[in-house]
Amino acid sequence: MAMPNPVNRYTYRDYLQWDDGERWELINGVPYNMSPAPSRVHQKVLGEIFRAFGNYLNDKSCDVYLAPFDVRLPSQDQADDTDNVVQPDISIICDPDKLDDKGCNGNPDLIVEVLSPSTAKHDRLRKFELYEENGVQEYWIVDISNETVEVLSLNQGQYERDNVYGNEDEITTHLFESFSLDLGAVFS
């Protein structure tokens, strides 16, 4: 299939046909190219957060996944024809029934997005709204330029800011009571 045209609307079936060596996401049927590759600092920070969650979840029932990992967010009438497919930097899924060989079919419990200059607006606006609408319980927005992590928690269907943590803070989550992450080590 030819590369997607941003004017057209697409579904997950179309998405599966794209083999152009690029990473794509679909939000409400609109394709977004996720190139170029993230910076070295982006990858380092992402790796530190992933390692912390991976170590914490090692003996627990939740799984943590690193991009590229397809998360399909179907509405009830869409099933495999969903027009929402994203690749969050980190996805934590606690319901094994949502996992299949293609990735996650449904909302993860927690999503982490590390901002890049090319994706910051996408992550703060489009993905924020998509994750909120689809019931992602917790959304972390990591700003490497300012060395902060904004934690948003779903409350009655809307995100509320729990806190903004800086590089001198230990970050926690409502989902995993004994989890904490030293942001000084993440941003060092």
Image (cartoon, helix red, strand yellow):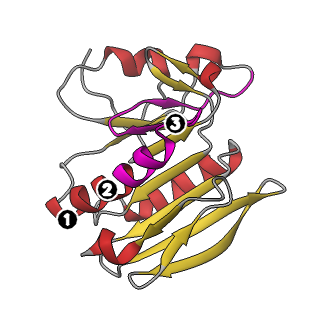
The answer to which of marks 2 and 1 sits earlier in the sequence is 1
Estimate the spatial distance between the alpha carbons at disc 1 and disc 3, rounded to whole Å.
29 Å
**Residue plotted at (21% across, 54% down):** 38
Say left or right for 69 vs 145.
Answer: right
Q: Nearer the viewer, mark 1 or mark 3?
A: 3
**Above or below — where is 148 with respect to 186?**
below
Say which of 58 and 147 sits in front. 58
**Above or below — where is 1 with respect to 43?**
above
Give the labeled residue for mark 2. Answer: 46
Give the labeled residue for mark 3. Answer: 59
Specify the amino acid type for callout 3. Answer: Asp
Give the labeled residue for mark 1. Answer: 41
Labelled disc at residue 78: none
Say which of 142 and 125 sits in front. 142
Residue 101 percent coordinates (x, y):
44, 14
**Above or below — where is 7 with respect to 111?**
above
Estimate the spatial distance between the alpha carbons at disc 2 and disc 1, rounded to whole Å.
8 Å
Residue 78 magenta-highlighted: no
Name, please, the residue furthest toward the bottom: 168
Specify the amino acid type for callout 1. Answer: Val
Name, please, the residue furthest toward the right: 156
Residue 52 magenta-highlighted: yes
State the extent of the magenta-drawn residues as a range. 51-76
Quadrant in the picture for residue 114: bottom left
**Residue plotted at (52% across, 27% down):** 104
Element type at mark 3: loop
Residue 70 percent coordinates (x, y):
43, 30
